[in-house]
Each structure stands twice: as structure tokens, then as C-alpha cells.
Image (cartoon, coloured by chain):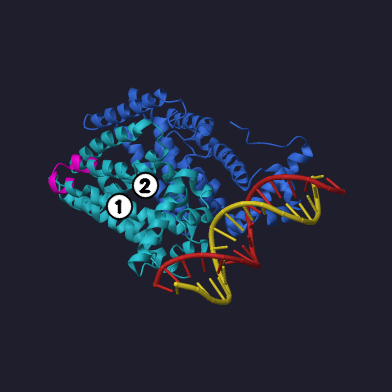
Chain colours: A blue, B cyan, C red, D yellow
Amino acid sequence: MIDSQPPAKTPKGAQTRALILRTALDLFTERGYEGATMRAIAERAGVSLSHAYYYFRSKEELIQAFYLRSHEEHMAACGPLLARERDLEARLLGVIRAKLDTTEPYHRFSGVLFRTAADPQSPLSPFSAASNPVRQQCTSFFAEVVAGSRTRVPEDLRAELPYLLWLYMMGIVLFWIHDRSPGRIRTYRLADRTAHIVARLIALAGHPLLTPFRKATLQLLADLREDTRAEDAVQSLP
Amino acid sequence: MIDSQPPAKTPKGAQTRALILRTALDLFTERGYEGATMRAIAERAGVSLSHAYYYFRSKEELIQAFYLRSHEEHMAACGPLLARERDLEARLLGVIRAKLDTTEPYHRFSGVLFRTAADPQSPLSPFSAASNPVRQQCTSFFAEVVAGSRTRVPEDLRAELPYLLWLYMMGIVLFWIHDRSPGRIRTYRLADRTAHIVARLIALAGHPLLTPFRKATLQLLADLREDTRAEDAVQSLP
DNA sequence: GTCTATAACCGGATAGAC
DNA sequence: GTCTATCCGGTTATAGAC
């Protein structure tokens, strides 16, 4: 993959780059993606148009930079909770809420981000090879969320659960992107309820009635992963 | 909403319109959404640029037209199966497979379509107000899928199940869009397995152990819908 | 009502002189 | 690094043909 963090060869350059990014995010938030023209971004940041293109090879690359920063903020925001809380539902809910909280300032513009990330051809797609590291990071993060709880997870499920939980969070974020309710109550409500359901489901996963479902689901994941290996190693599952 | 099927007042006009659409789909498939310029579409179709805009008010509307046609083809393809088969799993699987079959020719271009449709600001988003009619059509279609089967569905679940199944299919399609395996085997496998799981889950939904989950899920949907109604009142303003 | 030709506007992106 | 000119493509407008 191409490095997505291009010029920043001097401290001054890094500062300028950060300034442009910050300005762009402001303008995106104020006027939306289309409304925030590169000319306007450059002008407000006090640099020339071509200089903006010097640091960000395209308008899209500005979004990519934002994406990475947001991800790191989420991780940081979860630290204290995960150190303190032992209840799985609370941990799960805390992580989801932290995701929503940290990204909220950029909700309006996140639709655009998603639009880009949704394209399977795009390196921003969460299923793309380029996103492999991030995906890996996310699943091992969720492994920690589970491992640090007092909930006992059936042996066979343990390996797959982090990936499934990542998918679950992706689903919440997808909903959040489309949510225009004030204060995003609908998404928070969705998170509350589903975190409860998911946590209960995990706790009950070992029950005989659910065992066929658990087995079937795990088998499915295993098979899909098998297919992936057969391909050119460039696919969705970790 | 504005009518999205503008001029076609004579048979000749309809023919020209169809020609432009067909040409556009070819070009989208060949060159992607961005690569297929309106100018190129018009040229290959043998009409003037302004004439293309006469039949399709925007480039986006071309995609929308495709979307509708694809939807109708899917419905048609399911007819025979639904008339014959009574087993829920088979019906469900047949419907999903028909969806995959009918859309396969446009897989490459569907990624592009999705990229547009994924933007909540876009009227192409399946969750947008503009898509309301299609969404409605889809859910009542799934209602028929369930009603025509011999599986008994708990009273409270019956009303929501069609919508849930539509969401389920959307999930399969999302996976399909990202699936680059030969012959799309991975998606077909996913469909086979999940159709089984989903059908079993529906059949067991009335079981005491699962009842809390069923209730929680239905309550969640009801609440979310409640929120939506409160919004829509406000949202209809310009 | 179908269709052409032509010009123009706007904003993203690039090239090249300075 | 910056500025200017320029390209490109979506979109609109006009004026008029059959």
C-alpha cells in the first residue's frame, strides 16, 4: 500500500499539515463535504490552493487523515473504563458509547467518510487489504473487552467473538451515520438495548438450545475464512 | 417527492430513454461511475448531451433508474418459487439467491452504486425518505415470503419480521458487494448457511428461552419507530 | 414532444512559470 | 513554496430544428 501520511518532513511542515486538516474538518462540519471547497479550505488556512494539494493529494485524503485520528481517540477514550469495569455488558456499552461520543462532532461529515469507505475499491473500505492493520487492531481490542470481563465464553466461540463484536460495532456506526435524531438519541438507545441483548446472548451461548446456532455460526465463519485463504489473501476476514 | 420517471410520452421517447439507460449501464460497468461521463454516455447512445439531460435530470438519476429496474427483475424472478415452495428456509434462500442471480451482471458497478447509496444525504440511500416506496415494497414482499410458508410465527413478531428480513437481505448484499471470489461462492455459501440459521431462529422464536430476546428486540424496533415518527413531523420542513 | 447545437458556469484537479 | 492558466466533467441555459 501507499503511505497515507505523505509530506511532513519538518516540524514546520507537520504544523502546516495539521492546520490544513483542522481547517478542513471545520469547514466540512460547517458546510458539508461538497460545500467546503478546496479553495475555501486553503484560503481559510492561509495557504495557497496548490500548497493544500501539496500536503493532501486529494480532497479524499483529508478524510482519510481524519479517520485515523478518530480511531486513535476512541481507543484512548476507552482506557479508563476497561481498566475499571468487569461487567461485560457495561464494558461493551462503554466502548460503543465512547465510539459515538468521540465521533459525534463529525457526524455530519461522517456520512461522506462512509460513502468513501463503503466503496470496496477504495482503500478506505474497512474490508480492504489496506484496512487490515486497523481491523486487526480493532478485533484484538474487542478481545481485550471480553477477556477483561468476568463472563465465561465457550471455548470455541472465544476465538471468533472479537471479530463478531467488531462487526456489531460497525453495524451501530452504520446506524449512527444515518441517524438524524437530536443528540443522536436513537443510536444511543440502540446501543443500550443491543449491548444488553448481545451480552445476554454471549452469556447464554453455551446453553444446549443455542449450541446448534453457535456451531453453525462458527462453522460458517471458518468456511468463509477458508475461502479467503484460497483467494489471493486480500479479503475481509482477519 | 418528485416523480423520478419524467419524459416518456411517446413509444419512441421511451425507446430512446431505454437506450440511454442501457448505454449508461454499459459504460458504468466498463469505466466505473466517475469514468463514465455524461458526455461519453450521450455520445455512445448517439444523442446530444442536452438530450440525455432531457430524459435524466442528473447522472444520479441514471443509477436510480437502474436500481428500480433491478428491483423489479428480482420480484419477477421470485414469482414461480414463491408460488410453489412452502418451506420457509427454501423460500428465503430462493429469494436471496434470486437477488444475487439477477444482480450479478452488475456486480462491478454495484460497488459504485453502493458508494452513492451509502451516503445518507443521497436520495439513493435505502434509508432515505425518497426510498420509502421501494422499502415498503420490499417489506411487504418479505411478508408474503413468510405468510406463504408453513412456519408459524409468534403473533408479536409477525409484524416486524418482514422488515427484519429485508435488513437481513441488505446484509447479504453488502457482503456480496465486497465479495470477489469466483462465481461469488462465498456469498452463496453465506446465504445458504444464514438462511438456515435464520429460518431455525424464526421457528424457535416462541421458545421460552428466546422469548426475552424476542421481546427485547421487538421493543427496540418499536421504540426506534416511535422516535422516527417524532422526527418526521419536523423533517418534512424544507 | 423529440431532438440538436452551442455556450457558459462552477468546482475539483493539474501544469508550469516564477 | 506560490500564482496563474488551464483542463475536465456535471450541469444549466438558450434558441431553434423536425
Q: Which type of secondary structure does the marked residue at label 2 adopt?
A: helix
- Chief secondary structure of the magenta span? helix
- Marking on residue A19: none
User: Which chain is indicated by disc 1?
Assistant: B
Residue B189 visible from this viewpoint: yes
User: Which one is in front, A60 or B47?
Assistant: B47
Q: Which residue is mark 2?
A: A193
Amino acid type shown at disc 2: Arg
**Is residue B91 highlighted in magenta?**
yes
**Does residue A96 appear left or right of residue A225 in this picture?**
right
Is B77 displayed left or right of A132 in the figure?
left
Q: Please state the horizontal and vertical placement of residue D9, each as a whole percent of the image.
A: 57, 54
Q: Position of residue C11 (x, y in %)?
A: 63, 58
Residue B76: x %, y % from top left: 24, 51
Amino acid type of the residue that numbered disc 1 sits on in the rendered structure? Gln
Residue A151 lies in quadrant: top left
Quadrant in which residue A54 is drawn = top right
Front-most of A107 and B167? Answer: B167
Q: In which chain is the residue bearing label 2?
A: A
From mark 2 to mark 1, how far is it between C-alphas? 9 Å
- Residue at image position (24%, 32%) is A210
Residue B219 is tagged as: 1
Please provide the residue range marked out in magenta.
B81-93
Up/down of B141 relative to A196, above or below: below
Q: Is residue A202 left or right of residue B91?
A: right
Q: Is residue B186 visible in this depiction of the protein?
A: no
Pointers 2 and 1 within a single chain: no
Q: Is B225 included in the stretch rendered in magenta?
A: no
